[in-house]
Amino acid sequence: MANILEVQNLTKNYGDFPAVKGISFSIKEGEIFSLLGPNGAGKTTTISMLSTLYAPTSGNATIAGHSVTKQPMDVRNAIGVIPQDLALYEDLSARENLTFWGQMYGLSGASLKNRVEEVLGQIGLVDKAKDRIKTYSGGMKRRVNIGVGLLHKPKLLFMDEPTVGIDPQSRRAILDTVKDLNKQGMTVLYTTHYMEEAEELSDRVGIIDHGELIAIGTQKELTKQVGETETLILHIGENEDPEALVTAFKGIKDVLEANVVDHEISVITHSAKDVLASVVMKANERGIKIHSIDIREPNLEAVFLHLTGRALRD
Amino acid sequence: MLKTFLIGIKDVKLAFRDRAALIFMLLAPFLLTLGMGLVTGRFSGSGSSGISDIPVVIVNLDDGEMGQALVDIFNSEELAELVEPNLGTSPEAARRQVDEDEVAAAIIIPAGFTRSIIPQQEDFANGDSEVVKIEMYANPARPTSAGIIKSILDEFMSRIEEGSLSGQTSILQMVISGRITPEQAEAAGEEMGKHLQDAPEDDTLAITLNTSTADGEEIKFDVLAFLAPGMALMFLMYTVSYGGRSILTEKSQGTLPRLLVSPTNATQILGGKVFGIFLTGAAQMLILIGTTSLLFQLKWGDALGVIVLVLVAVFGATGWGMLITALARTPAQVGSIGSAIMLIFGILGGSFISLDQMPPLVQTISRITPNAWALDGFTTLALGGTLANLSTPITALLTMGSILFVVSVIVFGRKNLAQK
């Protein structure tokens, strides 16, 4: 498969602050590629440059053979953008919104009308098409937001954290939509800070942190970087002090890393069963009650932790 | 071009679906017009125009009946509230009074005025029929008052011209037919002149504040013809700032960045937004004009003139809306600046108090507002003027709008429309 997107040393500075630091990667046609990173890592800035919204400070990218800096109109015709925040007219109905945005992508007449109805069916809102967006639930709005990006059947679809702040059911529907679109041949660049979404959707993942692309590859390739490790997740009471316990865990033989994430303690080790007894003992010594312990195989969270020393949600 | 149009139409649709905006755009000006109409007694039939005691100096150098007839009209009971005439003796002194802003206009009736209308026997014999014109020296600082004086004068002159023409024709026909001799023509003319002078008593020359349109339709100066455009223009400023605010609202709500990543360039987008503001403002004005015409039987005047004036007024106001938007950083800033400008321009532009009753400095400052120019135009139309009489306000509003657009585009050019 040919590359539909090629990024070369793309950089964006806001004044003295480097938001994106010379990242390079490519996406093949038909792939779902996820940019995984915590908030503020540079994901949205990267998508903004690739979608021609912001001019890069340096570097370049080509989409379907068109330079984002030199041929922005060609790039815009080739891409669909689903922004992180809802970008819809609340006082227009779903049908009116889709019609307007379709017109902005050059659709007109019968082809516009047909495509709007197709997309309404695709996002499951045919029955509510006449209602104004402001009467919709958050999940329904998200679906229209996605529908707008699909109207002109783009070659490459940018989805910038489309599941932030929505209910699990809508989230599930969006993830299924992404998979369906990909099955129909659409290439997707998906940004998220949810490791599970990247794991479920992606053919390949790029991990971005502080504006740098620190790892890229398939999930298998990335987890290999961590080595053969397992992660113990300890759930403790909210009144307990996890920091003291983390320090104690780091002193246990065979513990590679220990961190606190949302009052959960993650302990990375080569063998969970070898350190489990020591972990429980250390907690008992300090009078800290462990509510439960999960043992997890290596995943992208562990990769991020391994590469940055921080959890994705930090 | 098509996308510009589509963006504009979308904005009109959004504006007219916003209930709060509708209240300010349509309901508020309508209710204020209604309220002020009630206060001024317009609906009870005892209406005053809100303009009164217009100072005017009349210098009558004519020794005939016609000059005196004009003086009498200005001193008549019908115009007692509206005008405050003073008789002068020197044309130079009268003009000076205008220059010093003591009066709204000076009317100088030249010597021989009556004779130029009712020729004497020797005039027939000499073929001397020189037209002697009345001079009106208007105060440019008091355009509305001067316009009213001019309309009274125009009415008088049109009646005189009608009378003179028909009188001369009648006398000529009588001479030709042999009913009178050329020597009797003078006496016949004097008789007709007396009839014209006496006519007010039998209502044929009743000069009220009326003018005639080209097709002869009678138009009365109505208090609402001053109040309604004043209110409509004031709330037009709300509409243009609301429209301008929508640019920044779209920016913060993400629809503007989304437009910018579609195959639509920034010029099309900004052009569409401006077009939307313009269309919304024009629709607002035309709805208000239509409503007040239907419900209050208000005659706005020459239809073509009204339409053109609405369009140029909205153009000028849109320029201000764009400038406010270009200078502000947030939609809230546009809202607060826009509201302040709406009120300031409303007061300065004469929406509440006639500009003629304001100090000269305020009158000069008022010229930065589209309200003042447009209100001049609407007053002219209500007094029977036509599109041809609107060259000054139209030129001023077009110039104002053009300058403000250029400045706004320069300021917008320095801003990053994409940044949320």
Image (cartoon, rainbow, N blue to C red):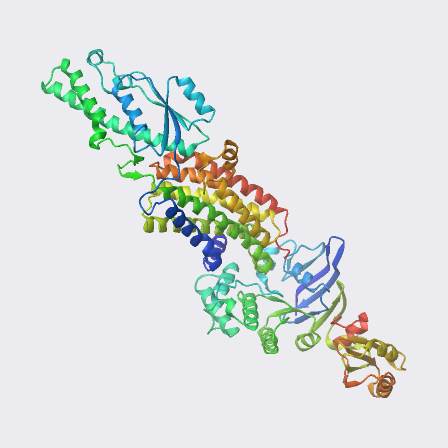
User: In the image, residue B316 lies at what x, y percent?
Assistant: 49, 42
Side of A28 where A226 appears, left or right = right
Residue B92 found in image quarter = top left
Q: Quadrant of the C terminus of chain B?
A: bottom right
- Tell me what residue is drawn at x 36 percent, y 30 percent: B150
User: In the image, residue B44 lies at what x, y percent?
Assistant: 32, 47
User: In the image, residue B53 lies at what x, y percent?
Assistant: 39, 32
Camera-side residue: A314 or A192?
Answer: A314
Side of B176 where A156 appears, left or right = right
Image height check: is B246 above or below A151? above
Side of A304 where B260 appears, left or right = left
Residue A174 found in image quarter = bottom right
Camera-side residue: B28 or B47?
Answer: B47
Side of A159 where B304 appears, left or right = left
Image height check: is A50 above or below A143? above
Residue B18 showing in the rendered view:
no
Camera-side residue: A177 or A75?
Answer: A177
How many numbered discs sit on the rendered protein? 0
Image height check: is A149 above or below A260? above
Image height check: is B339 above or below A47? above
Residue A178 showing in the rendered view:
yes
User: In the image, residue B402 lies at what x, y percent?
Assistant: 51, 40
- Tell me what residue is drawn at x 43 percent, y 28 percent: B139
